[in-house]
Image: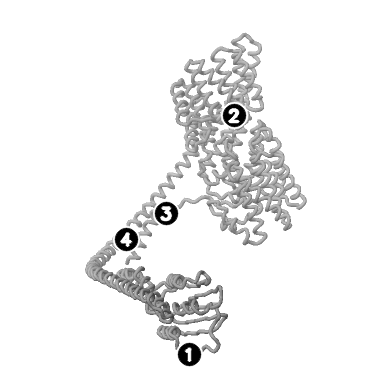
Amino acid sequence: MFKACLFGLILASFLMTQSFAQQPNFNMQQQRLLMEMSAAFKLASKEFNIDFDSALVETSRYNGMNRIFLIGEGFYDHPELIKKIWPDQENIDLLKRNLQSVGATQRLNDLVLIGAFYAFKPGSEHKNIDSACNYLLKAKQEAEGAGQLSLANHSLILLGKCYLKKQQFDTATIYFKQAINSSQKLGDKATEAKAWFYWGLYHPFDMTSFVERIGYLTKAYELYLQLNDFEKQSACQYYIGGLQYMIGRFKESKDGFEHSLRLAEKIKFPYTQYTSYYTSLATRALGNYPQAVTLALDALKAAESTKDSTCLGEIYQLLGNLYEITSLNNEDKTFWFRKALKEYIKFNEPSMYLSASAIAKTMNDQNRSQEALKLVLDMLKERPTDNPANIQNIALALGDTYAKLGNYNVAEKQFLLAEQMEEKAQQTRGDVSKWFLYENIGWFYLGAKQYEKSRKYYVKALTVLGLDRDPKNYSRVQNSLYKIDSATGHYLDALNHYREYRRIEDSLFSVKTHVQMDELAFKYNAEKKDNDIKLLTKQGELKETQLKQSKMNTRIMIGGIVLLALLSALLYNRYRFKQKSNQKLEAKQNEINQKNAELMRLLEDKEWLIREIHHRVKNNLQIVISLLNTQSKYLDNREALHAVNDSRRRMQAMSLIHQKLYQTDNVAFVNMQTYIRELVDYLEASFNDGGKIYYELIIDPIELDVVQAIPVGLILNEAITNSIKYAFVNKKNGCIMVSMKTMTNKSDVRLEVKDNGIGLPTGFDVAHRESMGIRLIKGLARQIGGELNIENDNGTSIQLKFCADNNLKSISTKELLKASINIA
């Protein structure tokens, strides 16, 4: 019944919480393409303030993809193998631990992979780059020794990447050229293409290297074309288009992006928002604004269909700029700029300052300059920045706003600050916005009627722009120059500027163009409404399904509740029964505890009595020993004196045992290690031989019952005393060895007292020897059931084997009592 109830509750919970959302499942090549494109987009949106590897980490985590597909490209391409050794945490420790246990081929692959792992680490920390170089150099050497030249070439490519990170470009060039030459000799076009691709892609941001990088990527594209690798062809054209755009080659840039877009559509790659966005940028720069809007809307559709919000800010910003150029309605562009600002803030993108600046400019055009000023100052207060490009955007917005408010001195300072930031800003975004800076400063001086200063900046803007780069902005500058020349009396120049302005405007913005723009906006809105209707329909169907599911869940829940109520009743019944049983057990336990307490008191009394007995026995023996000591002083007979001394030593041997017993917690067993050492020390002091006898003790940690310990102690006393008295006659030095060891079965004990003295007399027979000492040793040996053996062995050896009584454990009375209480 309990299982049925539990099943019902689990099933109900499962049905109510089940989610059907699922991410697209791409093959390995398309995952690489998505990571490469999205990382490049992220790098540009961060204005190159992070490195490519950091962008890779961010985008791969956002898209839920494993970077191993990119890191292991060309040498570690098996997805199943990758899943086993490369967990989502990107932990490489398992590979390191297994390097010595895997086969030779696997070891080489693992070495390259570990090196690649460190080579793709975000940032440029020396420890990561050094670790990468160490593993990759080792992999290269071992691969060359094993004839695995393709793996060696992959190591060279990754070494080139490392030295690009170090900005040691000459060393990087050496490694890339070695990889390319070796791959060409092997006829390995895929690895050669990878070398050109890495060389062109992973170079740090540097405007002077863009032309060379375009050449490297072009060679990679040509090889991927021969290999029919459409994903890598698309990636190459994507990067080529980006580099061409950065150096102002907008036509070539557009060609590259369009080529990449066609290849992506050919392989049915849905994440076309990145390429469509950049194609729109290049098309806008060429003055084809309707097509630029179409491409920007395509990018928006792709981003929405793939649920990719990382690029929405840039797309919204682009649409705002396009409507700023083509529309008189300020609400259109403000709508897109505000959406862009919201996305930028969500992802903490630097472009948030560009959006804020654009919104402020629109507000100024609407005579809402106080609102614009508050927007910009709040942005600076809440999100301060030290990025030169961001400072420049904010300074231009403040300059425009203060100029609208009539505060020309403050406005001029802001515009000049923006100009100061240009050189540093170019290091992260190139000079594509340089004309915008000059146009804004020229506009300010034009409004302030400082015509010569205005002319200077507008001429600079005209020089940077050029007709082929951005005809719309070019025409706007021509119109401003017309106004300046008209105001300063240069009427012929003014006429020429005006003619050029009208010619470009007429070619760009015919009625047909405006109709096209309106149609595009209408189509987008209509399509959006259709999609909204479809979405509402699906939501209605989903609600109906959810309603049915809810009814089923309700029935299941009711059944579960009934079962739960029955189970609760059963459990309550069991609880009451157990409670009564516990009360009875508690009463019995109290009774047992009382008896245990009484038993403990009795045992403590018994223990105290036993100790007292041992103490008194020891004291009585000491009294007898003292009497014998006193008696010995009045004896003149040598034999009588020896007999008294022997008796005294025997008494001392027994006294030591009783002393040990009352001094320790254990009143039943004697620690023989300690006892034998003290007995030998006593005998050595008693005879006072002047140090001519050396005592060697080899004693195992053995504990004996008092019944066995006393006979063993007396035997030891007799054996050691005999050796001291008779073994070393006419010898200056001697050694007495006392050994007590456990035998194989642990219960048998072997006791031996051996000296290196003169040994037993010739014809000595233990069986018929009736001296006091021998008779005592033999009798005590029989008492403990031991096997006695006395023989000559380079001296006298007395050996005794007996079985230790292990029926009792060597624990104290208190411990026995506690154990019994715990059992109870």
Give the residue at mark 2.
425
Give the residue at mark 1.
767
Who is closer to the viewer here, 8 or 704? Answer: 704
Give the residue at mark 3.
18
Give the residue at mark 4.
560
Which comes sooner in the sequence, label 2 or label 4? Answer: 2
Relative image position of residue 234 (x, y in whole percent): 64, 44
Tell me which corner region of the image, top left, top right, bottom left or bottom right, holds residue 623: bottom left
- For residue 185, the mark is none
Q: Which corner quadrant holds the N terminus?
A: bottom left
Which comes sooner in the sequence, label 1 or label 2? Answer: 2
Which comes sooner in the sequence, label 1 or label 3? Answer: 3
Q: Which residue does the image show at 47% across and 84% down from the upper left?
A: 788
Which comes sooner in the sequence, label 3 or label 4? Answer: 3
Q: Amino acid at mark 3?
A: Gln
Q: Is residue 384 visible?
A: yes
Label 1's element? loop
Label 2's element? helix
Q: CA distance from mark 1 to mark 4?
A: 92 Å
Classify 10 Å Cα crowding around label 2: few (below 14), some (14-19), many (20 and above): many
